[in-house]
Amino acid sequence: MQAKRRWLRSFAFAASPAPRYIPIRFTPAFWRPYIGDVRKNTSPLTQFLYKNESGSYCSESDVSVWCDVFQFGWDGDLEQLPRIKPRLHLFEHIHTREMHAKSKEYFANLLSTEPYQIDCNPDDDVDIPLMPYIEAAAMKNLWRDVLDEWLQDPRGLAYIAITGGHSKLLQCLATEYHVDLKTFNLVDC
């Protein structure tokens, strides 16, 4: 009887051989291609912080790093990020008041020399105020308490909103501050 069982067992296992496990060594060289793929899919801020630790980082994507910082409302120290010259489109990525205040403090010495540039000559007598680039965040997010200084002259602010492409602010100025946008002469803009 035991011989019969042995024979049945050997027959059953002979039909399906035992699985062979190939030992894989999980060394850093094994993981390197996978880690590289993961890094390619991370945000520019994450790539900068990782590469900054290893000491190899090229400055081609400094603006992308700052865009990520502003979009995510990063809580880290702005001093460890790459130095850049403030640009108008960069500050439009700020979504929180905390990041706006933090950026205003960080770029304080640069913002005073970089006003919002207007490249048109309005025919009517409108004083177009000088506005730092960082206020693009306030115009995009309609932070009226930040824009109080410029809301005293709504027509001048409307010219700045037209130049910066802030349609929500223009709509607000037209409805709440009675700025007639049809009277603007924007031929030279």
Image (cartoon, grey):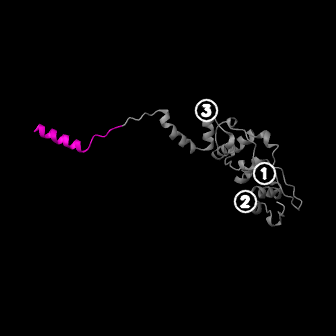
For mark 1, what is the residue? 148
Of the residues tagged 3 and 2, which is closer to the observer? 3
Nearest to the observer: residue 180 or residue 41: 41
Query: What secondary structure characterizes most of the magenta part?
Result: helix
Q: Mark 3 points at which residue?
A: 54
Relative to 111, is 81 on the left or the right?
Answer: left
Residue 52, given in percent of the width and then of the height, sits at 63, 35
Going from N to C along the chain, the mark reached first, 1 or 3, is 3
- Please state if 56 lies on the left or on the right of 30 as rendered: right
How far apart are the alpha carbons under marks 1 and 3?
45 Å
Q: Is residue 50 visible?
A: yes
Q: Residue at x 86, y 60 (%)?
A: 122
Local packing at callout 3 (Cα closer than 10 Å; few below 14, some 14-19, many 20+) is few
User: Would residue 6 be counted in the magenta stretch?
Assistant: yes
Residue 145 can be seen, yes or no: no
Q: Residue at x 75, y 40 (%)?
A: 107
Secondary structure under tag 2 reads helix
Q: Mark 2 = which residue? A: 167
Image quadrant in which the N terminus is located: top left
Question: Of the residues under marks 1 and 2, which one precedes in the sequence?
Answer: 1
Comparing labels 1 and 2, the label whose residue is closer to the camera:
2
Please rate how many residues cluster around mark 2, counting C-alpha atoms within 10 Å: few if below 14, some from 14 to 19, many from 20.
some
Residue 142: say if magenta. Answer: no
Quadrant of the rendered structure where residue 167 is? bottom right
What type is the residue that disc 3 sits on? Ser
- Specify whether 31 is left or right of 176: left
Crowd band around label 1 with a 10 angstrom C-alpha radius: few (<14), some (14–19), many (20+): few
- Range of residues picked out in magenta: 1-21
